[in-house]
Amino acid sequence: MFQVVIRNFLRGLLIVAPIAATIWLIYATFSAIDGWLHLEQILDRRVIPGAGFLATFAAITLVGFLARIIGLRWLFRQLDGLFARVPLVKILYTAIRDLTQAFVGERKRFDQPVAVAPTEDPNLLLLGFLTRDTLDELGLPGFASVYVPQSYNFAGQLVLVPHDRIRTLDAGATQTMKFIVSGGVAEARANTPPLE
């Protein structure tokens, strides 16, 4: 009897946990963004939940629209240059700017999924994304940089490897990222030839 209860609990957990975690993550993200502008303090009255989220979305969209206007492009370039020159601030600013551009910019960086052999054994592979094809500027000719995300985490590791230990995957970037982040339990559709 107890085993039946445990089995049904675990079966229910498999259904409820992903749904609850997804709803919680969406709610937490929505609530965080909704509170960015502190509309209740600005307007000195209660506002409809979601008004801050919509106002933030509208403000970011407006900045994106204004960045296309020739006269204002100069201003945004000056702001970018200012933040990129201020000591200490430039480290944080340029890292966040480059990471944001890597995901949503015109020059996406996490769009080339690869498998990397980190050791002499070609059967041991790490999955990641090619971020730079050459590292000559670092004095490492014949090397490339690969970002290797961690499973169940918003972190990763940058590895520098010789070109002959990298092979491009025949899979989409989104599918590969889901596979890595899920710890390999998400479906993967990659047709990769063996390392030679």
Image: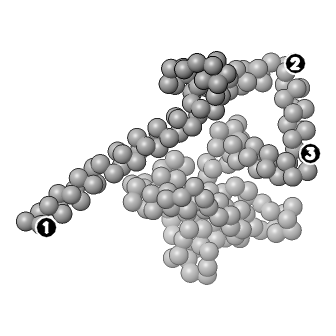
Which label was assigned to residue 141? none
- Viewer-proximal residue among 34 and 91: 34
Q: x%, y% of residue 81?
A: 90, 38
Q: Residues within 10 Å of mark 1 (few under 14, many from 20)?
A: few
Colour pattern:
one colour
Instruction: Reply above or below: 65 against 27.
Output: above
Q: Residues within 10 Å of mark 2 (few under 14, many from 20)?
A: few
In the picture, residue 23 is in which quadrant?
top left
Tell me the quarter of the image containing the C terminus.
bottom right
Q: x%, y% of residue 134?
A: 78, 60
Q: How many discs appear?
A: 3
Which label was assigned to residue 3? 1
Q: Earlier in the sequence, mark 3 or mark 1?
A: 1
At 53% across and 75% down in the image, what residue appears? 124
Judged left or right of residue 18, residue 70 is right
Residue ranking furthest to the left: 1
Q: Earlier in the sequence, mark 2 or mark 1?
A: 1
In three-dimensional space, the C-alpha distance between marks 3 and 1, rounded to whole angstroms, equals: 64 Å
- Viewer-proximal residue among 74 and 135: 74
* Marks 2 and 1 in Cβ contact (< 8 Å): no
At 51% across and 61% down in the image, what residue appears? 151
Q: Regarding mark 3 in the picture, which secondary structure is present there?
A: helix
Instruction: Reply above or below: 126 against 61.
Output: below
- Viewer-proximal residue among 6 and 167: 6
In the picture, residue 56 is in which quadrant?
top right
In the picture, residue 189 is in which quadrant?
bottom left
* Marks 2 and 3 in Cβ contact (< 8 Å): no
In three-dimensional space, the C-alpha distance between marks 2 and 1, rounded to whole angstroms, equals: 71 Å
Q: Mark 3 is on which residue type?
A: Arg
Which label was assigned to residue 85? 3
Q: Regarding mark 2 in the picture, which secondary structure is present there?
A: helix
